[in-house]
Amino acid sequence: MNGSDLYLHGKHFLHRRDYRSALQCFIEALDIERRSGDASHLIDLLIHIGNIHAYLGELESARPFYEEVLDLQRERSDPRAVGLTLVNLGNLSRESGDLSRAEAYYLEAEDILSQTGDDQSLAVLYSNLALLAQDNKDLDEALRFFEVSIALHKKVGYEAGLAAAWGQMGRLYVQRGEEKEAETCFGYAATHFSSLSDPIGEAEALRELAKVYERRPDPELALHCLVRVTKAHQKYGLEVEESDQRWIGRIKEDLNNIE
């Protein structure tokens, strides 16, 4: 199998969220491209490999791939790409607990992206600045950044960014103890993920929404959310998680006891 075919197979596995299979395909494709001198997918492959390592929590494995990408993008004088890679490096630093280093990466990214007029990239940056503010326990600042991010995502019509940002802001509202606002955010997130045909993201948002209803308590609405989770999985041929099945069973038992 050649590098281009492996790259396409990796994209397929990535869409299915089979991250280990995608990673293997991308690593093999990268090795072929380095040996052949074909750099058509080089930066994309490096980014995908870095992203998957980061998603899997393998932060230090991700770093050299992002750093190589950054060097290549600086050589090509691509400010948008440089800014987004700085965001990725900021994310690695934030997730590893080095908040000062993360802030430095984010601020450099903001300087660069602000000059490009690229609202979609800025929206991604501000979502991550919101998460950094949360880590620093500045919840008001985090909320402000999320509001800016969502406004920019709406401006450019970037639905995937909206889905993620609404879910993140919902978790912030839970942390702030503002359950009604959290309910609204998770509802929006679930709707956007559904429109994107992303059952994994939809299920995550609906689970968070079910938790809100359980804390209220409103077990009927919580059960409704979890039934939607199972239907979303079944629609796309995904396995229903045992934890969801147990959760549904527990709520049904609680409802029977109430009756």
Image (cartoon, rainbow, N blue to C red):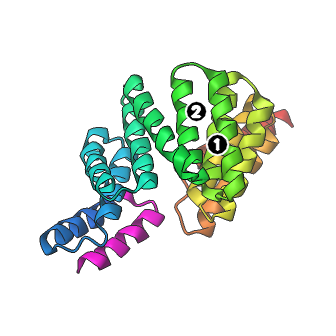
Front-lying residue, 23 or 209: 23
Residue 170: x and y in percent read 68, 37
Describe the element under mark 1 as helix, strand or loop. helix
Q: Is residue 117 left or right of residue 251?
A: left
Q: Residue at x 27, y 50 (%)?
A: 71
The image quarter containing residue 96 is: top left
Front-lying residue, 29 or 79: 79
Q: Which residues are magenta?
A: 1-21
Q: Which residue position holds label 2?
A: 130
Residue 24: numbered disc:
none
Residue 1: x and y in percent read 23, 80
Residue 157: x and y in percent read 69, 59
The image quarter containing residue 11 is: bottom left
Is most of the magenta stretch helix, strand or loop?
Answer: helix
Describe the element under mark 2 as helix, strand or loop. helix
Q: Which residue position holds label 1?
A: 149
